[in-house]
Image: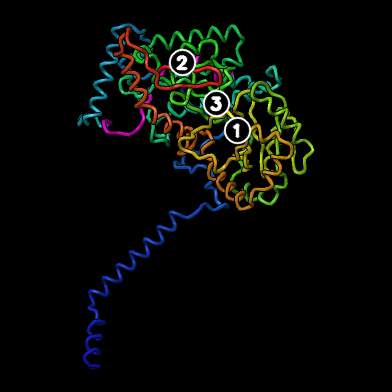
Amino acid sequence: MAGKHSRERSQSLSVSPSSVFFLFVLSLIAIAFIVFFFTSSSEINPSSQSTLPLFENPKITPEFSFVASLEKFLTSSSRTPKSQNVLDDSTVADEESVKKLDDMIWKKEMGRIHGDQFDPASSSPVLRVYVYEMPAKFTYDLLWLFRNTYRETSNLTSNGSPVHRLIEQHSIDYWLWADLIAPESERLLKNVVRVHKQEEADLFYIPFFTTISYFLLEKQQCKALYREALKWVKDQPAWNRSEGRDHILPVHHPWSFKSVRRFMKKAIWILPDMDSTGNWYKPGEVWLEKDLILPYVSNVEVCDAKCLLETESKRNILLFFRGRLKRNAGGKIRAKLVAELSGAEGVVIEEGTAGESGKKAAQDGMRRSIFCLSPAGDTPSSARLFDAIVSGCIPVLVSDELELPFEGILDYRKIVLFVSSGDAIQPGWLITFLKSINPSKIREMRANLAKYMKHFLYSHPAQPLGPEDLTWRMIAGKVSNIKLHIRRSQRVVKESRTLCTCECKRATNISSPSF
C-alpha cells in the first residue's frame, strides 16, 4: 500500500513542461497586477506635490493669480472671433425668432434622445454651453478698467476694504469665462464644452462683469450699465424662450447687479451664499434647487505640500483669527466671539489691516495655527474659510445659516468643525471643545485639507477637480430639472393654478418661488 501511495503522489507531483510555462506566465501577470494596484491606489505622500492640481498639459503652466492671469489674458491673447451663429447675438427677440430657436432645439434634443447617427455629439455626456458675445463695454472694457487701476490701493470701500481686493475675491466670473472661451486645444476640462450654435446649447452663459462695474464705475454710470445689460440679455430669443431658466448669471458679490437682478430671478445665479436674513437677496430670488454657491478666491498664498510639511511642527497657536472685528447683520457674532475669546490661552484675535503687510500677517498666523476661526461676515459667508483651507488650518465655522460650495460633491465634515453660535459664545465652551479633540483626529483632518485644497484653487487653464470643474458638475445635475420647468412654462395656460416645486420656509413667513 505504501508503494501504491508513493507512486500516486509521484504522478500527482509530476508537471509537464507546458504546464510549467503556463504557471510562469500566470505568476508574471499576478506580479504586474499587484505592482499596478499598489502604485495606483497609494495614499497621498505629504512630501509630494499632489495636493495641488496635476498639470495634465505640461506645455501650459496654470496661473493661479487673478492679476497675473488677467494680464496675460488681456495682453497676450487676441479677442475671440465672432462665432458663426445661426441666430446672431444681435438678433432681437420676436415671436418668430423665439419659435425658430425652440424648433431647432427640439430637433437637436430628439436627435440626442434617439441617437442620431449623423450627429456625433448625440450621445455625448458633456455639458454644452453657449457663451453670449456681449458688447465690449460689458466684458473686455471692464477687465481693462480693473487692470489699469488695480495698483490704486487708496481706493477703499466705506468700511475700509480695498475694492480691487474685493473684486479679486469675487472674480469667479473671469475664471469661468476665460476657460469657456479658450481654444479647445488649451482647455483641460472635458465635462463642459463651448458650442457656437444656440440650438446645440444646454445652457447660456452671460459674461457680464457685474462686480467690477459695481466697484469701479460711478453709481449712476453703473446703474445705467446694469439697465443696458438687462435689456441686451432680455432681447435675446433664447432668454425669451425659457424666461432665463437656462441662463447662468454670475453675481458673486452680494451687492453686484442688485438694482435690476429681480428681473432675472429665474436664471441660475452664481453666488457666495444665500443669506437668509433678507438683507441681500429678496424672498423668492435665490434657492439651492436653482442657484449655485461658489467659493471665494483666497486672499493668501497656498500652503503646498512642502509648506505643510515645514509648518507641521510650528503650529503652536490653538485658535487664530485676523480680520474685521465688527461686521453687520449676521457678522455681529464676531463682536461676541471677541469678547469671549480675547485673552484666552493659545488664542490670537487680531484686527485685520489692508495691504501686503496685512495679508502676510494673516497668512503667517494661519500657518502657525491648528484651528482658524471662521465666523459669518456681513453675509453668512467669508473668504476666511477658504484662506484657512489653503493654509492647512482647520476651520472652525461659526455661521448658522451658511450654504457651502459643491456640497453635493464634497463632505465638509472631513475638513471643517461646525459650531453653533449659541455654543461658541458660552463662557469657556469653545476652548474646552477644541482642546478635547483627539490629536489623531486633527492629523486626519489636516491630511484631508491637503487633498481638498485643489477644489478651491481657480486657475487658467482650469484644472480637473478645480472649482471651475466642480461648478459644471454641479450645474449638470440641474439641467434635467431646468428643462422640465422650461417645458412646463411653455404649455401651462394662464388660467391654470400655480404649482410650486420648492417651498422656502422662513421664521415668520413662507415664500414660494416658482421656476
The kind of residue on which mark 1 rests is Ser
How far across and down, in percent of the image, does residue 293 sit?
51, 28
| Secondary structure beneath label 1 | loop
Q: Residue at x 38, y 36 (%)?
A: 190
Of residues 434 and 12, the one drawn nearer to the viewer in this rendering: 434
Residue 273's tag is 3
Marks 1 and 3: CB-CB under 8 Å?
A: no
The numbered dot on residue 298 is: 1
Give the residue type that dot 3 points to. Answer: Asp
**Place of residue 371 in the rendered image (x, y in percent of width and height, measured from the top left):** 66, 42
Q: Which label is found at residue 406?
A: none
Highlighted range, magenta:
121-145
Instruction: Label 3: state its secondary structure.
Output: loop
Three-letter code, disc 2: Lys
> How far across and how far down the image is residue 173, in percent?
51, 24
- Label 2 CA crowd tier, 10 Å (few <14, some 14–19, many 20+): many
